[in-house]
Image: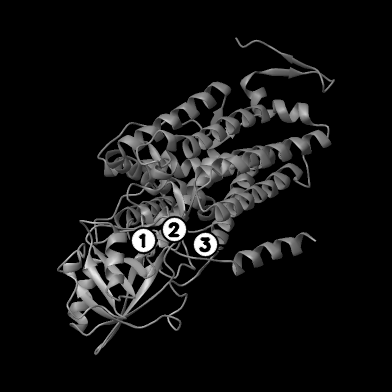
Amino acid sequence: MSKILVASICAIFLCVQVNAQEAVLRAFGPSGENEYCIVFNSSWTHLPPSLNNATLYQLVNLTSSVLCHQTDLPPEGLNGKAVVVMRGNCTFEEKALIAQSSGARAILIASKTSLSTPSGVNADKGVNIQVALVRYKDVLNMQKAFKDNISVKLYAPSAALFDYSILVILIISMFTLALGGYWSGATEQAPWEANICHAAYKVILVLINLAALGGRRKSESSDEIQFTPLKVVIFVLGMCGILVLLYFFYKWLVYVLIAMFCIASAMAVYGCLAALVQMIPCGQCSFSFRDKTIEIRFFFLAAFCIAVSVFWAVYRNEDRWIWILQDVLGIAFCLNFMRMLKISSFKICVTLLSLLLVYDVFFVFITPFFTKNGESIMVQVAAGPGATGEMRGGNMVEVPAEPTAPNEKLPIVMRVPRLSSPTQYLCGMEFSLLGYGDIIVPGLLVAYCHRFDVWNNNPTKIYYISCTIAYGVGMIMTLIVMVFSKMGQPALLYLVPCTLLTSALVAWRRKEMKRFWAGTVYEMEENPVAISSNESEVIVHPKE
């Protein structure tokens, strides 16, 4: 039954079509044909869905005027033709009415600025011709290619409501969370693996010190971090402060975050590959540097990881393909983060996830009431200022009129291009986004569940498996709401209740809620205890 339900939902997503605000202008001339991006408002302008259904119009070039007066019209009129005029001095509606009075069937408004969705035209006032915005540089390109003998067709290919990039995002998030949670629990059984990863960190830091011509010596202690209630509150407040600072000082802090991501991702890839390198029999010879002994194989692995990180930094704005490497580095970053952060009890999980749920909802849904442009701080920071191609979930779009310097984006999201967008390469790359926090935060709970399974020798891994499935259900809910609402969603609004309630229900059904809530191993390590022969009796000795 469940398989039929899932199949039905997928079928609905694939069959339902939506009208895009971006369309295609196909220009024909004696020497060939070209396609260009145009932007229109589908609420009052109808464009056919395919080239075969579109009407061919001869194009009249009036870019020497803005067509705000009848005197701007040519003496011979525009009967049955399309006309292109410059933007400015009067409304789109006024331009359309003047062109329509002369017999025009379509009007293209050339813009030297960004192509924002036309507004202010009311079909009830008599505008019944096609109205769209086109880049002025594209008009110049048409003139250069076809001179004055140009014919055009305007059409808006329908896009599926469901884009396959959403399925890719779901697979990436599920894979990363399941593997990260399993790895965190596996280190409870195989502490040698954690030691290997820590050794990998030492090698990375040695190479970074070499590049920086020095640096302080690092501690020899474990690299694991354990959360306490106080650390949870400080952590969440710190995230709020960093997000607000990024919103106001983005153009400076973005480079700091990029540099930090390069270092962190190199360390993360190293930590993930260290266990595999350990299986390689060759390269076990070592050398000494600053009282540290380093194996040759680890040295070359460190060099490889740093090279990959630097490669991403150099080509980070190549949207057509660099997203693949960024997602790989992001997966490694999330895996390593979940392994390093240790949550010792369900009590701390509830505190952390609940606070971050409030944080996520506030910065997505509440902050638009306080920002000047009505955009949420979370979306603005995640996509980057000016990155309109990654925020086109609603009814309004904006396409740059001229090639500009790439906008720097924070490497804190998984990015997958929208694979079914019909205007992807004409109007600019569009991406589906998922923040690292939407994987890491529930992943900390999944990791705790797996460690609890290990502590209690649960052969079925019931806590780990059930929490992972609950995360998948929460992600599907998030994506469904996002698709139908056509706006970004705070994923934790759906992920936190699904994972917390499922974990609590499993513990309650197994009559282990008290132990699950309080934790076991890590809280006992913080307070030395002596356990009597009665397992339920624990005597805590004060620390000396």
Residue located at (59% from left, 66% from top): 16
Q: Earlier in the sequence, mark 3 or mark 1?
A: 3
- Circle 3 residue: 165
Q: Is residue 270 visible?
A: no
Label 3 with label 1: CB-CB less than 8 Å: no
Percent x, y for residue 379? Answer: 43, 44
Q: Are marks 2 and 3 in contact (CB under 8 Å)?
A: yes
Reading the image, the residue beneath label 2 is 431
For marks 2 and 3, the one nearer the N-term is 3
Dot 2: few (<14), some (14–19), or many (≥20) neighbours within 10 Å? many
> Between 515 and 481, which is closer to the camera in this rendering?
481
Q: Secondary structure at mark 3?
A: helix
Number of numbered discs: 3
Q: Which color scheme does this rendered protein use?
A: one colour
Disc 2 is placed on an element classified as strand
Residue 401 in the image: state x and y as whole percent.
26, 61
Residue 384 visible to an observer of this rendering: yes
Residue 504 is situated, as x and y percent measured from the top left of the image, at 74, 35
> Do the residues bearing badges 2 and 1 touch, measured as CB atoms within 8 Å?
yes
| Residue under the point 18% across and 76% down | 74
> Label 3 crowding class (10 Å Cα cut-off): few <14, some 14-19, many 20+?
some
Label 1 element class: loop
Alpha carbon separation for disc pair 2 and 1:
9 Å
Task: Mark 2 vs mark 1: give the one in front.
Answer: 2
Query: In the image, 473: left or right of 51?
Result: right
Expressed as whole percent of the image width and height from the top left, the position of residue 360 reads 52, 37
In terms of depth relative to the viewer, which is nearer, 212 or 327?
327
**Left or right: where 88 falls relative to 304:** left
Q: Write down the residue under mark 1.
A: 319
Q: Amino acid at mark 1?
A: Asp
